[in-house]
Image: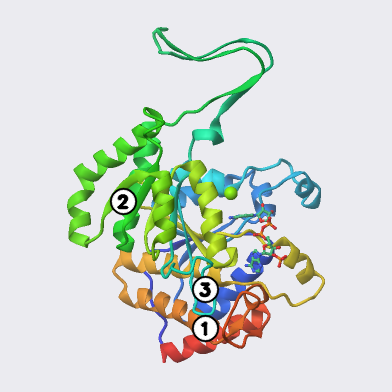
Amino acid sequence: MQKIQMKTPLVEMDGDEMTRILWKMIKDELILPYVDLKTEYYDLGLENRDATNDQVTIDAANANKKYGVSVKCATITPNAQRMDEYNLHQMWKSPNGTIRAILDGTVFRAPIMIDPIEPIVKNWKQPITIARHAYGDVYRDTEFRIDKPGKATLCFTDTEGNKEEQEIFQFEGKGVVQGLYNKDDSITSFARSCFNYALDKKQDLWFGAKDTISKKYDHTFKDIFQEIYDTEYKAKFEAAGITYFYSLIDDIVARVMRSEGGMIWACKNYDGDVMSDMVSTAFGSLAMMTSVLVSPEGNYEYEAAHGTVTRHYYRYLKGEKTSTNPIATIFAWTGALNKRGEKDGLPELQDFAQKLEQACLDTLNAGIMTKDLCHLAQGIETKEVNSEEFIHAIQTRLNELMA
Ligand code: NAP
Ligand code: MG
């Protein structure tokens, strides 16, 4: 069989622990036999991040800006225990944080649905994608504990030294006070990423905030989204047959619960943090969540939503065969290959990515699963397999689809 050719390299960001093991298995068994794979390889494994003073993470993010599509393996964010374990020079920052800061994007997370796992919300028939604004608000707040009577004010000083001040509250006793901010630039990027992603997926976009209560802060989010929609996207949405609408966050929550799913739900930073855990739990498992970072310029970075599965890795190091689920990591590869194919006009590459996803779904729907899914599956007889056997079962189905 002739291998499928590529034009532009994918930016490949290797990672750590169990997912690094899966990474190699996926490439060797499910990609390299079929695709003449072109990648620009960056080793984001913790050892190499330490050896390069984390320069490799910055280089990888810049390569994403150059080529436009990357695929990332899960990576360790070091803590005190990792300092000893890996004998690190520094407690390096989260690679995802570094990459997000350089690409300035929005994170889209969506569940992979299969027949034997029914969402807990019984009317959800299609995946719900959460688009989380990953900048500012309570994650960059300033806060005080007030321990005596006094006045709290909010004060802005411009570059000329002019002040604008408002009273927040006159405290008669103890209390708390908090200051938040966001930037029009970041909100604008968030809005554009959401509109582009909705067009890409041909799905409706819903956005909820609390502008009736937060008449300046949340209202600014609402206004920026509306202005960008009206001036840049309305015609494109109409042509694609999809809609955008804004409503109060509590109304959106109620509508989402009653819906059949199938929409993109844009959330402010805190709402996205909370709602993505609710949505992923209701759909089944973190090992079945895809995640993609989309920058305002239309650069894409695909990854799995879960971590490096450390507990399984320690068992693997003892020589055990683990039943770690590779699905989200495989879908990171198919997402990236499909996007590369789309950008470069390579329908064969897109077709391959689609077939590999189909082979995964066929394997799961036949009841062949890793341990994490076996106890969630209903209405079929399941066969628990280890990662190696699972990837092999996918390969068998992929060969049938490719024949
Ligand atoms: P985790 O790697 O997501 O794993 C937590 C638990 O969830 C696992 O022990 C396992 O449960 C289950 N699980 C997750 N993915 C699975 C899969 N593919 N197949 C089967 N089970 C799966 O989270 P963590 O243990 O909190 O973090 C481990 C490391 O990952 C940390 O160093 C953290 O910094 C890093 N991390 C990286 C990313 C990223 O790069 N995007 C994200 C999160 C965390 P059982 O043990 O019960 O089987
Ligand atoms: Mg969270």
Residue neighbourhood size for the residue with mark 1, other residues' Cα within 10 Å, grouped as few (<14), some (14–19), many (≥20):
some
Q: What is the number of the mark on residue 365? A: 1
Q: Which residue is mark 3?
A: 118
| C-alpha separation, residue under disc 3 versus residue under disc 1 | 12 Å
Q: Are marks 3 and 2 in contact (CB under 8 Å)?
A: no
- At a point 56% along the width and 80% down the height, the residue shown is 29
* Res. 322 visible in picture: yes
Residue 215 spot, x, y in % from top left: 37, 28
* Res. 145 visible in picture: no
Front residue of this view, candidates 401 and 215:
215
Residue neighbourhood size for the residue with mark 3, other residues' Cα within 10 Å, grouped as few (<14), some (14–19), many (≥20):
some
Residue 87 spot, x, y in % from top left: 79, 48
**Earlier residue among tags 3 and 1:** 3
Residue 193 spot, x, y in % from top left: 36, 49
Residue 75 spot, x, y in % from top left: 63, 55
| C-alpha separation, residue under disc 3 versus residue under disc 2 | 29 Å
Q: What is the number of the mark on residue 282? A: none
Q: What is the number of the mark on residue 195? A: 2
